[in-house]
Image (cartoon, grey):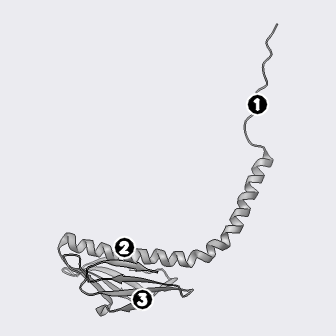
Amino acid sequence: MTAIKPRSKKSGFTLIELLAVIVIAGIIALVSLPVYNSIKPRLSLNAETRDIASDLRYAQQSSVTEQVNYSVVFNQAQNNYAIVNTATGQTVKNKDINQAISIQSIADLTSDTVTFNVTGAALESGSITLVNAENLTSIISIKPSGYVKIEQ
């Protein structure tokens, strides 16, 4: 007698199963797109705020590491800023702010400049207020100790 081989089961997906997955993914994308578009301005504002705060901290750390003052010079009219080594006058970094975000105001900073000394302290305290197209604002505060804080 010959042994009967069991039929092997084919593994894989049928065309109908694949189409069902594609349709479900499409429906999820259609539902989530308006939600994403509604939160995108806030996400952009938060991202730009974090970038500026990060660059302020970079300037502070550079001043401590190299034992020279570093400044972050804001240009509200051109919506950008630069990190400058004040000892050499060399611009370390230029950054244009996202076009959807603008600098609304710069308070208590002489010449719109934040300068950190060799101990990491800011020469003066102040704040930078950013605004997006939906009038949502975000504030970056700089304390005399050099503490950089993001306020929503």
Badge count: 3
Question: Which SS class for mark 3?
Answer: loop
How crowded is the residue under tag 2: few (<14 C-alpha within 10 Å), some, or many (20+)? few
Q: Mark 2 is on which residue type?
A: Ser
Judging by the rendered image, the residue that carries numbered circle 2 is 54
Counting residues from the start of the chain, the first of labels 1 and 2 encountered is 1
Q: Are marks 1 and 2 in contact (CB under 8 Å)?
A: no
Gap in angstroms between the C-alphas marked 2 and 3: 20 Å
Q: Nearer the viewer, mark 1 or mark 3?
A: 1
Q: Mark 1 is on which residue type?
A: Lys
Question: Which SS class for mark 1?
Answer: loop
Counting residues from the start of the chain, the first of labels 2 and 3 encountered is 2
- The part of the image, by quadrant, that contains residue 55 is bottom left
Judging by the rendered image, the residue that carries numbered circle 1 is 9
Residue 78: assigned label:
3
For residue 103, above or below residue 40: below
